[in-house]
Image (tube, rainbow, N blue to C red):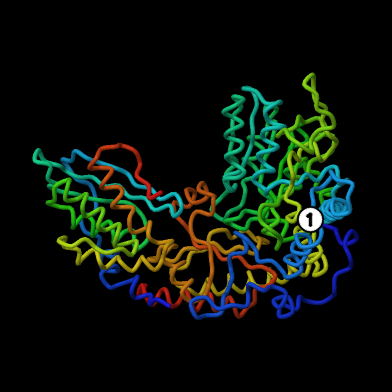
Amino acid sequence: MNQAQTHPAPTAGPLDVESVRSDFPTLHQTVNGRPLVYLDSGASAQKPELVIDAMQAYERQDHANVHRGVHTLSQRATDAFEGAREKVCRFLNAGSVREIVFTRGTTEAINLVAQSYGRTRLGPSDDVLVSEMEHHANIVPWQLLCEQTGATLKVVPFDDNGELLMAKFEELLSSRTRIVAITHVSNTLGTVNPVKQIVRMTHATGAVVLIDGAQAVPHNAIDLQALDCDFYAFSGHKLYGPTGMGVLYGKEALLDAMPPWQGGGDMIKTVRFSGTTYNDLPYKFEAGTPHIAGAIGLGAAIDYVSKLGMDRIEAHVRELLDYATARAAEVSGMRVFGNVPGKASILSFELQGIHAHDLGTILDHEGVAIRTGHHCAMPVMEHYAVPATARATFALYNTVAEIDSLYAAIDKAREIFRT
Amino acid sequence: MSDLRDLYQEVIFDHNRSPRNYGELAPSNRRAEGYNPLCGDHVIVVLRLNDDGVIEDVRFKGRGCAISTASASIMTETVKGLTVEQADEYFEAFHRLALGGDPEAGLELTKLEALSGVRDYPSRVKCATLAWHTVRSALHGTGETATTE
């Protein structure tokens, strides 16, 4: 995806990871007497100082409500808040800031589309398509919608490598299909789905596509103009920004035609008991006082990754993943879930004879933080008939030496369990 | 820093590798399922309660981490031959033990103490208590899936 022209030119050459690490205060600590090795950025990434500072500066100097007062602080808060929206718009190469709705996260963004777009349009003769590799956040809102409207939820399976079965997708896609909701990058398998092709095929049937970009946005540059999807959702905290902050992108014509989702202040133009008129986009979907510091933090996070360059970040984490994958092959009894070429920097695995939770505890003892469990993707666990997996995710601040620490800790676990 | 060996005592590995009272039980008259949605740990406890309210026999099966498997195994050894009331007392005592409280005087807790290491690992307490919640659910016949929530 060609996104470079919309960002400040990043520095050339590979990422200087030591310099990057010095930007992240949380990384510099010991856990259980060992240097912290944080390999759980897929669940939530750490924040660079610049993000923390931007949020604090707002709270300390500029805090006031947005879009309301005529006073100076309110104007500053509004400028910073709307400035963040412009950054998101440029970062994703969206058409206009009217297409950028701030939400609490990816989950809320998907629920918004399910309820506002789906509930008014779907009926018993309609289908919603999701994939078997979705995060629960891209399953349950559609299940709720189907219960409410009588529509049918259909599931596109993946093969044992973790690759979406496009032939099955084509088979399930029909004139009944109204919405296709699919993840850009699987949070468990790392699979990067052929979303462009999915959008093209779906549009040919007249249905709309929502893409869950929670894992993709931190991983590679997104160009919404090229992608042409109808809705795109992501979260701030996986992009080195704050929690409680997310984005829904929607094509302007679609958002315009959709009814409000929540009612309240900020989303109205006039309120009378005889009738209320709603505000323009994107405010129609932003009822109540928003997470102002969150938006500012997200804007700062976008500045940060843009300056480093998404292409360089992607190259760096790919190197880490390749190294970690090669080392995994040397560990007897280690099974990796998700082997699709070009996958994102997510390594899900199990060790024969050691349950993921025992492994997680032992690794933590060695200072290594990984995710263990079902990763909010229970259908994926079911696919492989495992109760849980261990998952290491590699981010822009991780190093090859940290992957060595991961494998040293895995050796320790195997020694303790004598596998 | 607590020692990992306090959590993973040899007894735990022993029960994890060769769980006692594992499998189905026939005839049986009480059954409950336990599920920890956070971890995906899953356990089924079946038992035979006689007319005097004594647990004549008990089995468990399921999938979980070493802590939850060992705890289920030790639980079955503990409650076999107890009355419902006695099993309830052990449930309470074990809960206190897992949370770092004082164990109950007068109860034989030697085996259960192998699991007391979880007190230093708050995220693992539920692994240890799942089987106990499940046996309680089986004994009191609520019929609902037991959770540690």
Q: Position of residue B15 (x, y in %)?
A: 26, 64
Name the amino acid type tagged 1.
His
Q: Residue at x 69, y 31 (%)?
A: A118
Indicate whether A159 appears above or below A52.
above
Number of labels in the image equals 1
Quadrant containing the C terminus of chain A is: bottom left
The answer to whether residue B53 of the structure is visible from this angle is yes
Query: Residue furthest toward the left?
Result: B52
Quadrant containing the N terminus of chain A is: bottom right
Query: Residue furthest toward the front?
Result: A71
Indicate whether A364 appears above or below B75.
below
Quadrant housing residue A293: bottom right
Side of A3 where A368 appears, left or right? left
- Helix, strand or loop at mark 1: loop
Decide: few, some or many residues near mark 1? Use Cα within 10 Å; few <14, some 14-19, many ≥20.
some
The answer to whether residue A201 of the structure is visible from this angle is no
Q: What chain is tagged by disc 1?
A: A
Q: Residue at x 60, y 55 (%)?
A: A187
Side of A117 where A6 appears, left or right? right
Side of A403 where B123 appears, left or right? left
Indicate whether A269 appears above or below A405.
above
Q: Position of residue B62 (x, y in %)?
A: 33, 51
Q: Residue at x 74, y 44 (%)?
A: A289
